């Protein structure tokens, strides 16, 4: 891991690329049980203070449609965004049948009722943990990066050592195929600054299912709201 060619680890200031159990892995089943291949070896998992980033579920589903990582569910994604996120089975009309999703974590496969259930369960699990952590919204980091970063730095007793600098290119320009086409700063601002993009690819049935199934407490706590339902 220390010889990684895709990630630079700032060990001198204590800020790490990801938690030692892996940034894409749920804490209840992977903390203390899994060691991330990249910069996870030799790190005291008890002494690690994670920053947990939450994302608007509608924007997150759009991200999953473009780069699904290890999440699998029935959907078709085209250049115009149609066919995804496909929350409700289009072949079943007499009832609402969610499209099941499954995620391949390092230690197990986990099955979910739908892509909405993945979002709910992931953040519900972090809410249930008792170890210290800091939550921040993706959208706040995107549009108010310097302000949010300073607040996070103050929270952990850090000091800004250098002038804040925005990275204009994609943060995931590392040559990995799974990150191909990832947004840079300007494209991300255009994508997530337009509320209409939250509904890209969603049918009316998808929208109703999402509105009814999203965890209302999480949505309220982090300042998210479902778009108005179609009439």
Image (cartoon, rainbow, N blue to C red):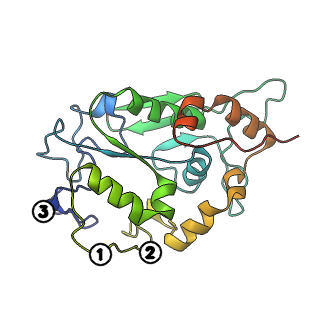
Q: Position of residue 91 (x, y in %)?
A: 79, 34
Looking at the figure, which quarter contains the C terminus? top right
In the displayed orientation, state which residue is furthest to the top: 95
SS type, badge 3 = helix
- Mark 1 → mark 3, Cα distance in angstroms: 18 Å
- Decide if residue 215 is in sight here: no
Taking 181 as reference, is 98 left or right? right
Q: Nearer the viewer, residue 89 or 50?
A: 50
First in residue order: circle 2 vs circle 3: 3
Query: Which residue matches tag 1?
Result: 163
Graded by Cα atoms within 10 Å as few (under 14), some (14 to 19) or many (20 or more), the crowding at tag 2 reads few
Looking at the figure, which quarter contains the N terminus? bottom left
Query: Which residue matches tag 2?
Result: 169
Residue 186, relative to residue 57: is it above or below?
below
Q: Position of residue 137 (x, y in %)?
A: 47, 50
Graded by Cα atoms within 10 Å as few (under 14), some (14 to 19) or many (20 or more), the crowding at tag 1 reads few
- Mark 2 → mark 3, Cα distance in angstroms: 25 Å
Q: Position of residue 216 (x, y in %)?
A: 60, 30
Q: Nearer the viewer, residue 96 or 123?
A: 123
The residue shown at (24%, 73%) is: 162
Taking 28 as reference, is 123 left or right? right
SS type, badge 2 = loop
Q: Nearer the viewer's eye, disc 1 or disc 3? A: 1
SS type, badge 1 = loop
Q: Position of residue 158 (x, y in %)?
A: 21, 57
- Decide if residue 143 is in sight here: yes
- Mark 1 → mark 2, Cα distance in angstroms: 18 Å
Q: Quadrant of residue 87?
A: top right
The residue shown at (56%, 43%) is: 223
Query: Which residue matches tag 3?
Result: 12
Task: Kindly indicate whether the residue at mark 3 contacts the one at mark 1 (C-beta within 8 angstroms).
Answer: no
Q: Quadrant of residue 205?
A: top right
């Amino acid at each position: 891991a220390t010889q990684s060619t895709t990630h630079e680890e700032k060990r001198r200031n204590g800020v790490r690329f990801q938690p030692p159990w892996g940034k894409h892995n749920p804490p209840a089943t992977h903390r203390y049980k899994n060691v991330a291949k990249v910069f996870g070896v030799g790190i005291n998992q008890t002494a690690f203070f994670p920053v947990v980033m939450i994302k608007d579920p509608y924007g997150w589903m759009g991200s999953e449609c473009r780069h699904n990582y290890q999440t699998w569910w029935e959907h078709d994604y085209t250049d115009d965004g149609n066919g995804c996120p496909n929350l409700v089975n289009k072949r079943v009309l007499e009832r609402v049948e969610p499209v099941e999703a499954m995620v391949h974590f390092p230690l197990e496969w986990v099955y979910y009722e739908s892509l909405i259930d993945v979002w709910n369960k992931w953040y519900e699990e972090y809410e249930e943990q008792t170890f210290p952590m800091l939550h921040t919204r993706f959208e706040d980091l995107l549009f108010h990066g310097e302000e949010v970063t300073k607040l996070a730095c103050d929270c952990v007793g850090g000091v800004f050592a250098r002038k804040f600098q925005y990275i204009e290119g994609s943060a995931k320009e590392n040559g990995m195929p799974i990150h191909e086409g990832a947004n840079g700063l300007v494209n991300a601002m255009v994508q997530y600054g337009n509320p209409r993009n939250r509904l890209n690819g969603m049918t009316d049935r998808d929208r109703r299912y999402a509105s009814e199934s999203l965890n209302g407490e999480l949505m309220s706590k982090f300042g998210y709201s479902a778009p108005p339902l179609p009439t």
